[in-house]
Image: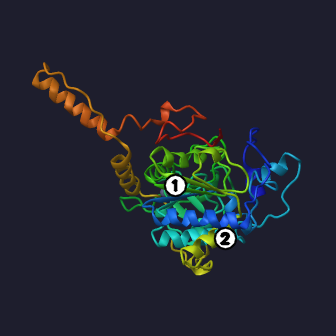
Amino acid sequence: MSCNYADGLSPYENKGKLGLEEKFDAKLEVSRKVSILAEWIKNSRHVVVHTGAGISTSAGIPDFRGPNGVWTLEAKGLKPQKNISFDDAIPTKTHMAILKLAELGKVQYVVSQNIDGLHLRSGLPRSHLAELHGNMFTEQCKQCDRQFVRNGSVSTVGQRSLNKPCSATQKNGRPCRGRLHDTILDWEHNLPANDLEMSDYHSCVADLSICLGTTMQIVPSGNLPLSTKKYGGKLVICNLQPTKHDRKADLLIHSYVDEVMEELMGILNLTIPEYDVTKDPTKRSHTIQLEWTIPNSDVKRLRNLYEKKCCKPKKRKIKADSDNLAQEEEEKKIKQEETECPSELISVEDIPLKTEMEDNCCVLQEGIVLS
Ligand SMILES: [Zn+2]
């Protein structure tokens, strides 16, 4: 079904580096590296996991740039043979291990580029998940912007109308009745603001970012883990193919993600839970609407945490000969600038497409682009 998703997107020529050769570390080497990762997880305060299509291939969903990826085969005029429907796929060992780690407070946040909805279906709560490119199992209202979980995947991609009214209630008690659309981004679409802002803040405050199953070629998603490094944290990359940021990684693991997660959980003395259909919000028998909107209060809380850790107050000399009024004005200005953290935060309008994020934490960028 990834093909149907891919077919639904508008044409886009530059799909990045495709079909790069996969590398496999020897078994002992993997064990050695996973022990280091386990140690780092134990000693970290704030861990963020960044996931790409590589974590869903064992569920039967093809990736995009792997040797048998959708874009790799497309370039050869072929289509993947393995191609399960999104509704039939179930979360992998990696999804379930991430859920367990999040439940135990060992992982604080998950930033996913995946649209397959498997994190949601594993039971991972919205408070712990950003879906930067949308989710096949959610829908959004054009009027009130709220998102809802669906019982089954959407039939459209590219934020098209689902011909369905929003059944949410407005603050004044009246029904919203806006029109619902799918949440799947096409190439030129803006990334969902709250998902991106949350991912950005979490990546900045994290002391450990773990990238699983992504070649990190898409921006801004692929550059977010670099913010962790910028503020003194560690970067771990687990992928079979080389990634764009291998040279910046503190630890590089070339192995199947499911095997890495199994070994990791073993070292941490934790069991990977089985996928439980009764905890899958997309398989509910009742019809109560389940909201999937990131509350603005969550974003505010993270912004505060980010400002506390990452924004240094700007010191500016106040002229000794200033009169009182000028001095008051100056102090007011400094206070405001400190709150706004001007050296770090950049407004959306200032950022052209394809801007690298390395030097700019908290960049809100438009569209999914290859860097
Ligand atoms: Zn609405």
Q: Quadrant of residue 137?
A: bottom right
Instruction: Between residue 150 and residue 309, name the one nearer to us.
Output: 309
Secondary element at image label 2:
loop
Residue 353: % across, % down: 59, 34
Q: Which residue does the numbered mark 2 point to in the structure image?
A: 92
Q: Left of 257 or right of it: where is 234?
A: left
In the depicted structure, whether residue 71 falls above or below residue 255: above
The residue sitting at the left extreme is 324
Q: Left of 18 or right of it: where is 98?
A: left
Instruction: Between residue 174 and residue 207, name the one nearer to us.
Output: 207
Q: Which residue does the numbered mark 1 point to in the structure image?
A: 178
| Amino acid on which disc 1 is placed | Gly
| Amino acid on which disc 2 is placed | Thr
The residue sitting at the right extreme is 77
Ligand 1 has an atom within 8 Å of the beta carbon of the residue at disc 1: yes
Badge number at residue 354: none
